[in-house]
């Protein structure tokens, strides 16, 4: 699998494209002036290849970027050369999911709607292992080693909730998720108890939407909307991940905005955080 670009690489490519277009220059003109191929410009701007800091400096000088902003972009270019922790697991992940992990790791906020299972960031190990093992039906040639590595990735992902610049994670979980038996009753007790434990984190908001609560629109698939804070003087757009066999990533506001509005409607229809935790606690007792 080709290397999955980090958000830093994506930020860099998007900003270089914006700066080029602000100067009214085409990729062909830049390639001609620097004696590069047009495809090299395209691959850098679309984060398909890493950009050397020296090459970025040449581009910034050509775009007549102010000194302060040049310093920020060069710092971003240097940071973009660093590999993410997930790179060592790419042989066991689909390209789409590896890309999502890379994005999630650098997001500032995440808004999740879960229709069938507990979201990955909030799964305990036995529950996660059962979910991942069941995916062997749709992921060809998944070995026990792949299962172990994917479980480890899921646990590693959860570090974003505990680090100094923690991800703010808000989820609306369908009540059926609490009632759906995954693996065993013991696994479900452990999972629901883990939800109660992680809900105590100040950056985690868990809400349950009752089965008898009216809801519009009706979604059959889980999704996560990722939001990114500005960095290195560069803004990065919201990204949407639809959690299904064919994972999808959107960056167009015309696509992400309706999903954000839908999530806000789900949140309004859901129980309060306190009532949600009480509902989860009741499910623990039921199991």
Image (cartoon, rainbow, N blue to C red):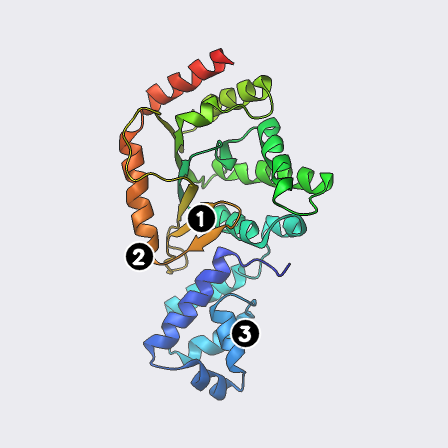
Single out the mark in the foreground, 1 or 3: 1
Residue 197 coordinates in the image, percent (x, y): 48, 22
Q: Nearer the viewer, residue 109 or 150?
A: 150
Residue found at x 38% / y 16%? 278
Q: Report the quarter where the N terminus lies.
A: bottom right
Tell me where residue 263 appears, x and y as whole percent: 32, 40
Mark 1 and mark 2 in contact? Answer it, CB < 8 Å. no
* Mark 2 lies on residue: 254
The residue located at (69%, 43%) in the rendering is 146
| Residue that mark 1 sits on | 241
- Spatial CA span between label 1 and label 3: 34 Å
| Residue 79 higher or lower than 57, as above or below | above
Looking at the image, can residue 165 be seen? yes
- Give how far apart the Cα atoms at labels 2 and 3 are: 36 Å
Q: Secondary structure at mark 2?
A: helix
Which is nearer the eye, 49 or 285? 285
Q: Earlier in the sequence, mark 1 or mark 2?
A: 1
Q: Are marks 2 and 3 in contact (CB under 8 Å)?
A: no
Residue 162 visible? The answer is no
Residue annotated with mark 3: 54
Residue 62, position as x, y percentages in the image: 42, 81
Image position of 134 with respect to 287: above or below: below
Local packing at callout 3 (Cα closer than 10 Å; few below 14, some 14-19, many 20+) is few
Query: In this rendering, would 131 be left or right of 106?
Result: right
Identify which residue, 172 or 246, lies in the foreground: 246
Distance from disc 1 to disc 2, alpha carbons, whole Å, reads 15 Å
* Dot 2 or dot 3, earlier in sequence: 3
Give the image location of residue 268, x and y in percent. 26, 32
Q: Residues within 10 Å of mark 2 (few under 14, many from 20)?
A: few
User: Residue at the location (29% across, 26% down)?
Assistant: 213
Left or right: residue 18 compared with residue 156: left
Label 1 element class: strand
């Amino acid at each position: 699998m080709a290397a999955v670009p980090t958000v830093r690489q994506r930020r860099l490519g998007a900003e270089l494209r914006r700066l080029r277009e602000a100067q009214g220059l085409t990729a062909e003109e830049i390639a001609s002036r620097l004696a590069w191929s047009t495809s090299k410009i395209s691959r850098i701007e679309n984060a398909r290849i890493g950009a050397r800091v020296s090459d970025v400096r040449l581009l910034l000088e050509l775009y007549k970027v102010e000194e302060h902003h040049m310093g920020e972009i060069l710092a971003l270019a240097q940071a973009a050369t660093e590999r993410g922790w997930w790179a060592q697991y790419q042989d066991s992940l689909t390209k789409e999911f590896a890309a999502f992990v890379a994005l999630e790791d650098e997001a500032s906020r995440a808004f999740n709607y879960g229709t069938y299972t507990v979201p990955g960031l909030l799964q305990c190990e036995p529950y996660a292992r059962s979910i991942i093992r069941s995916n062997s039906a749709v992921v060809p040639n998944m070995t026990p080693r792949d299962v172990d590595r994917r479980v480890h990735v899921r646990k590693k992902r959860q570090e974003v909730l505990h680090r100094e610049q923690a991800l703010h994670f808000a989820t609306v979980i369908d009540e059926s998720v609490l009632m759906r038996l995954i693996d065993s009753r013991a696994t479900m007790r452990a999972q629901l108890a883990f939800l109660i434990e992680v809900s105590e984190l100040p950056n985690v908001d868990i809400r349950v939407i009752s089965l008898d609560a009216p809801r519009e629109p009706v979604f059959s698939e889980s999704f996560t909307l990722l939001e990114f804070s500005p960095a290195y003087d560069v803004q990065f757009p919201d990204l949407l991940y639809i959690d299904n066999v064919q994972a999808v990533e959107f960056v167009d506001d015309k696509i992400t905005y309706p999903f954000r509005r839908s999530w806000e409607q789900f949140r309004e229809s859901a129980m309060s955080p306190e009532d949600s935790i009480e509902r989860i606690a009741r499910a623990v007792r039921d199991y």
